[in-house]
Amino acid sequence: MTSIDPTCVDQPGVRPPLIDGDDTYSALTERVCGIAEQPVLETPKAWFVAISISMSVLAMLGVVIGYLVVTGVGVWGNMNPVFWGWPIVNFVFWVGIGHAGTLISAVLFLFRQKWRTSINRFAEAMTIFAVMCAGLFPAIHVGRIWLAYWLFPIPNQMEMWPNFRSPLLWDVFAVSTYATVSLLFWYLGMVPDLATLRDRSTTKVRKLAYGIFALGWTGSNKQWHRFERGYLLLAALATPLVLSVHSVVSFDFAVAQLPGWHTTVFPPYFVAGAIFSGFAMVVTLAVPARAFFGLKNIITMRHLEVMNKVILATGSIVGYAYIIEFFIAWYGGNAFESFAFQNRAFGPYAWAYWTMFSCNVIFPQIFWFKKARTSIPIMMVIVILVNVGMWFERFVITVTSLSRDFLPSSWGYFHPTLIDVLTFVGSFGLFVTMFLLFCRFLPMVAMAEVKAVLPVPHRNSSGDSSSEDDPQEPTASDAPEVTL
């Protein structure tokens, strides 16, 4: 297999191929399908170790939630005046993580950015799993979970009705819509690849399972036309959600009268931060996945470098928002607002603020240098720090503003409990478990889309572009692409 000369990246007007090497259609199918088709007993031990650890953490989450339901929310560190503690912080964190999947899948698709094809499938999966983790925290935050139906807009004997002017209710509609559209978008794009797995299945169970979800796909021109049109419509529906969902989440804070929250910069600030943290998580997952599953020639260094550029750009936007918050607090002439931001930077939570600022603004600036953007160890350190910093951002926004109320008599210091910590760690168990199962049993690369960007279609191993010496095994995802 030949490699692409990395120096061609630096030549003006010359771009390297999106797929490294001389892959044929059949070689690409073999590589991606081989992961899902591998017998369970032949699965690498490393996967079993990883899934065992993640499922153990997930089991711990179940135990902690059970203890919470039986005992009550008093086991958390929420107190007066910090009634919103880690559960809301974790909710906003996980919703933000899920933003990169929709951006890569929908927005970049509409802008015809072909580099997205190698990473969009597992970025979309990451979105689904992150929203699952996010939805967990509001569900258990209500306290008496068995009475959660009181929140639904249904007639009842108590004449209770949801307050549709509350941003918390807006969250329900925004996040549920986001989850539904993202799930449909992810599943629709996977249908041709599921049909490929169905056609290659050697056991009745696999053929039945993949066949059910392949929805009778045969790869005909008519089906491809309907598929392309449906995919385009879902992309158009999902694109506004990239901006609206985290904007609505920011309204949880922005429409309040509390100093530190009541600011109009929150919607664009939250959206930029969500894309920032989402791309950091995509890189965090892509680097080990491409190495472990042998996908380095499909998820190339060019993909990682482009994502690092997005992280640099959105990190700079977030840094600008941090600075403009202080300017607006001073320019507005509101003493309470000025105190809120001075307290963030120099008060009892200064350690959290400067951890946030360092991880989100200072450290990502190293991506200005190409050597840093293309160095696996450096990018892994930076993206992990970004994930840490974005969690601290939500902590700083939520806790520091609540801990210092208008009157000193209402001040307090928030201390998380062990249950807080275990619940948050357990959510990672849910996220990683779902991601590992997805990588093992479903096509983690969009084969049908990647084949469309291969350097030379149907190229054989000898370099001859004719297909006579290297016949390609037709699959359901090899039908010609229909142009809308």
Image (spheres, helix red, strand yellow):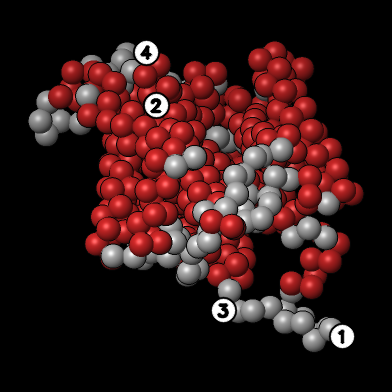
Give the labeled residue for mark 4.
1
* Front label number (2 vs 4): 2
As shown in the figure, which amino acid type bears the numbered disc 2? Ile
**Looking at the picture, how far across and down is residue 306, in whole percent?**
30, 34
As shown in the figure, which amino acid type bears the numbered disc 1? Gln
Secondary structure, mark 4, is loop
| Disc 1 and disc 3 in contact, CB within 8 angstroms | no
As shown in the figure, which amino acid type bears the numbered disc 4? Met
Q: CA distance from mark 3 to mark 2?
A: 40 Å
Q: Is residue 277 above or below residue 255?
A: above
**Looking at the picture, how far across and down is residue 123, in whole percent?**
49, 41
As shown in the figure, which amino acid type bears the numbered disc 3? Arg
Secondary structure, mark 1, is loop
Q: Is residue 313 above or below residue 215?
A: above
Q: Nearer the viewer, residue 99 or 322?
A: 322
Residue 192 visible somewhere in the drawing = no
Give the labeled residue for mark 2.
382
| Disc 2 and disc 1 in contact, CB within 8 angstroms | no
Name the residue at 72% across, 55% down. Answer: 141
Label disc, if present, on residue 157 of the rendered structure: 1
